[in-house]
Image (cartoon, helix red, strand yellow):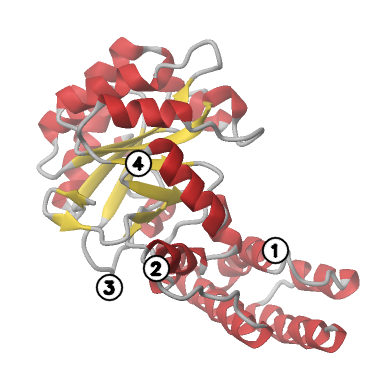
Amino acid sequence: MEIAGYRFPNALALAPMAGVTDRVFRRVCRGFGASVTVGEMVSARSELRDTRKSRLRLDFSGEPAPRIIQIAGGDAADLAAAARVNADAGADIIDINMGCPAKKVCRKAAGSALMADIDHVGRILDAVVAASPVPVTLKMRTGVSADRINAVAIAKMAERAGIAALAVHGRTRDQHYRGVAEYDTIAAVVAAVSIPVWANGDVDSVARAREVRAATGAAGLMIGRAACRRPWLFRQIAAAAEGRPAVAEPGLADEAEIVLGLVEQVHDFYGEEQGVRVARKHIGWLCERRAPHPALYMDLMTAATAARQIRLLDRYFDAVNLAA
């Protein structure tokens, strides 16, 4: 896959996820083979650009190009201004969020709620592409609901507006993350446009990655929730696609090193108080497939200091090792 001169050899992308795809997690996933990583969405509203939350979400220091910043909002002028500001600040690609189903986003007529008004979508696409000095991409869903599937129409509109690539999640807005992703609509989008398309939704194994590529004909795959639990999935999918030997799941010692390294970096990035809170969700995801050890796990998830969280993580993996 290539977008405006940027080449993505395996076309495997880490999906943008608010509260997850910060600089630390992007670096981890790139280390495991993701060739595209997208930052957490940032608000297009000017009064929210200089908050600590936005500054952390816009921290791409030390990362290779392209630095992809996703903007979210419902006003075409705000989104156009945000594209300009973020490009001037160092973004190499601007991504427009029309995929988030979260109520707090959709209540503001942003995210996937935008797909309900196709004329307004057109105004946003035209405004952002015209304002941005860097390429613009679009992430969306298949539609608003099962009886309002309009991804193909929006994809055609996006291509005409000058959007450089699309990512399509195989669910409607009202599904949120429930049910099973469908790929027929993504295949129809791929057939309808000549720009690259990422297929997103339920890509959680090497076998599913093969199925989704075959079903959609998409140029690339975008992985979200499965990457939270198994960031090494990128390396496994890439090896299979390239005909290389299969990449095994990490052993317990390697997994402990991955989790501890990620948690320590999260502490450093956010500072102790917030870092401990953010680390809890990563610990929960990455330890899901191991023996529960309920009492120790509860202590671990309620630890209030970085030192205690690390100490309990060591104890947790020791306990898992003894139980193996």
The residue where tag 2 is placed is 243
Marks 1/4 in contact by CB < 8 Å: the verdict is no
Which dot marks residue 284?
1
Marks 3/2: CA–CA distance: 32 Å
Residue appearing at x 40%, y 64% in the figure: 238
Residue appearing at x 21%, y 48% in the figure: 93
SS under mark 4: loop
The residue where tag 3 is placed is 62
Amino acid type, residue under disc 2 in the picture: Gly
Marks 2/1: CA–CA distance: 33 Å
Residue 45, picture quadrant: top left
Residue count near mark 2 (Cα–Cα under 10 Å), binned few <14, some 14–19, many ≥20? few
- Please tell me which of labels 3 and 4 falls first in the chain: 3
Amino acid type, residue under disc 1 in the picture: Gly
SS under mark 2: loop
The residue where tag 4 is placed is 218
Decide: is 242 above or below 94.
Answer: below
Mark 1, mark 4: which one is toward the viewer?
Answer: 4
